Structures are given as C-alpha cells and as structure tokens.
Amino acid sequence: MVKIRIENKWISREKMMNIAIIGAGFIAGVHAKSILASGNYIHTVISNIPSQAAEFAAFFNAKEWKTDYKTIDINSIDCVHICTEPSLHYEMICFFADKNVPIICEKPLTLKADEAEKLDGMIREKEVPVCLCFNNRFYPAVQEMRRKIAENELGAPIMLYGSYEQSFHIPPVMNSWRFDADGGNDLRAVSEIGSHLIDLIQFVTGENIVRVSAKFKNRTEKLYLNGEGQLTEDRTDKEFVLKNEDTAIVMFELEGGALASMCLSEISAGKVNELRLNIICKDGRADWSNDLPDRLNIAVKGGDDSSVTLGMQTGFSDSYINMFSEFYKFVNSGGFASDMENNFAVVSDACKNVSVCRAILKSAENDGTFMGV
C-alpha cells in the first residue's frame, strides 16, 4: 500500500500503477487524464508519429516515448492502454496478452467476429486481465438502473429504447480510418457509438441480444476530398463515396423476450455526445441520459414519478476514472484469482458486442431482414 495526497488529504491505496499508452489522439488524452486523476503514472507513450509521441509524453509528464509498442520494456509497466484504431487491436492484444500484461482497450474490441472469438479463447486460457472501455457502465445512475432490474423492483423488462447522437461527421470533416470501409471499417455509427448502447442494453438487463433488424441511411452518397485532407461537399477532382453509415435504426430481440430499439446518428447538428436509454418494465419504468448523468428517473405502477440523484455531479471523465480504478484494483487483488465483483466489460462481453454489430451489418445489407446473433 502507498499513500497519495488528494485535496489536502492523505489516503491509502493500492500500489501506484506504471502505465503505457498506445496512441496520442483525443481518446488517448481522455485515458491519460483519467490515469493521472486516479493516482497512477504514465510511464511510456507510444505513437507511430514521433512528434505526436514526444509532445503527448511531455504534456502528461511521461518518462519516455516510443514509436513501436514492441520495444516497450515489459518489466517496467503494470498495464497497457490501447487507444488506436480498432483494426490494430487484435495484434496488440495478442502481443501483450502473450507477455501477461494487463490490458485496457478501447472499443470495439475488433472489427472481425473471428478475431474476437480467438481473443476470447486466448484470454480465458491465459487469464490475463483485460478491460474494454464501455465507460457508460460506470455512471452510478446506470448501475442503479441495473440493480433495480436485477432485484425485480420494476418487474420484467418489456421494451427498451435508446438513442445516441453526435455531430462529428457533418462535413467538412477530416478523412480518417473511420471512413475507410475498404480497409475493414465497414461500420461507423454502429461500431463507434451504437456499441455503447448495445453494451448498456445487455449490461442493464443481464440478457443477451439474440436477433437484430437494421436499416442504414446516409446524409449524402458522396463527398469530396480536398487538399487539406477533409471530406467536404465542395466539389474537387477527388470524389469520395461513403461506404459506411451516418445513421442507423436497429431493432433487437433479447433472450428473455423483451424488445429493444436504438437510433444512431453521427450527423446530428448541435448534438456533441448525447446518449439516452429508456426501459419499460411490467411494474414500472426508468430512464437515463448522459446529459444529466447523475440522475435516474423512475416511475412505478400505482406510485409517483421520482428522480434520484446519484454521485456528486458525475461526468464523462469520472466514468473513465471509476472504470480504470476498478480495473487496477482487480489487477492488484490478484486478477482472476480474486473473488472481486466487477462492473467493467471483459473480452467475452466485447466478443458478444462484435457479434451483434456484425449481425446488424448483415441485416442492413439484406434490407432489414432479422438476423440471429
């Protein structure tokens, strides 16, 4: 045990973790801030662009930076955070799992169902602690919603519906791997934001999604690539055909018989990052939104509506801090050898998520026909 000082108070905690971060983009920055806020240390930063790696390492006071994750001194780190595009996840997870390094990986786990299944089998066999970043599980209001369903306070789930809206892909927008359908990223709204709702639906109900039906719709069929690397509506001599989805509407069937739906959009003007989830049960209902993340709205049959506030103005960064802290505690307590109950998503959860996403794509390619997961 060590002691750290937070707000002029010394508290005891497990040993400080030495962390490696692979990636130097936006989400890597979210990870870095949350690692430091949870009382841990960024030892190594890895990016294949040297200037980005050096700048990121200097900003977050890391000990060193590298351009190749395979050159990390494994004995110097306690955990690695993978914050890269998903097409790179499989190889990286295999590399670190083979060396028994605990892993925190951004979602989705991978873009291919067969890779996800292989990772699930390997992680189970080697018992390497792995956490997937479905951070919305770590809002206290979401955990309370899950508890109420598990303890049957609202009765059996009948119907769930949710939405996730962002504005990041309204043109002009920088071209990136997210638009590279030919390179393997054949999903965009579904894998980027829909995966969060898929995870929440299964996490809150404790039930697997077993069938899906989906339709996709894009704002436009094509954009144009300009000299600054942006996709724009202004005509250039470089036409860019959009091959993955701006928006999606998806219907689910859960194994317990409940129905669910989600509406996704990455082209919603004015919506930076709005996630909503509603659940209607036999004896009541509950709803939550990340716009008011510490508030859970509840109504029960024959009773009044109520709004419960959980946490102290819990926000986006808190969900990452809470997730990382729980995972580090799990690692420090012995990992798979411990009897600690966890909320973080493991590889088997992420594998199911990938399977749902692939079934959604197959359904959309077949005009919304229901597909089994």
Image (cartoon, rainbow, N blue to C red):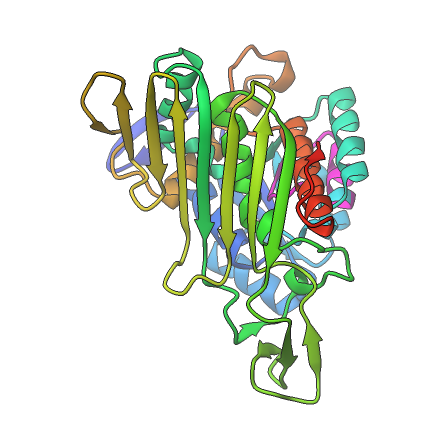
In the rendered image of this protein, does residue 358 appear above or below residue 127? below
Q: Is residue 90 visible?
A: yes
| Residue 191 at x, y percent in the picture | 62, 48
Apparent side of residue 187 relative to residue 2 in the rendered image (left or right): right
Question: Where's the N terminus, which quadrant?
Answer: top left
| Residue 108 at x, y percent in the picture | 64, 43
Residue 180: in magenta span: no
Q: How many marks?
A: 0
Give the residue drawn at x 40%, y 29%.
279
Apparent side of residue 334 relative to residue 288 in the rendered image (left or right): right
Q: Is residue 39 visible?
A: no
Image quadrant of residue 338?
Answer: top right
Give the residue drawn at x 59%, y 71%.
220
Apparent side of residue 74 relative to residue 21 in the rendered image (left or right): right
| Residue 363 at x, y percent in the picture | 70, 44
Residue numbers of the magenta segment: 91-110
Give the residue drawn at x 33%, y 28%.
286
Question: Where's the C terminus, which quadrant?
Answer: top right
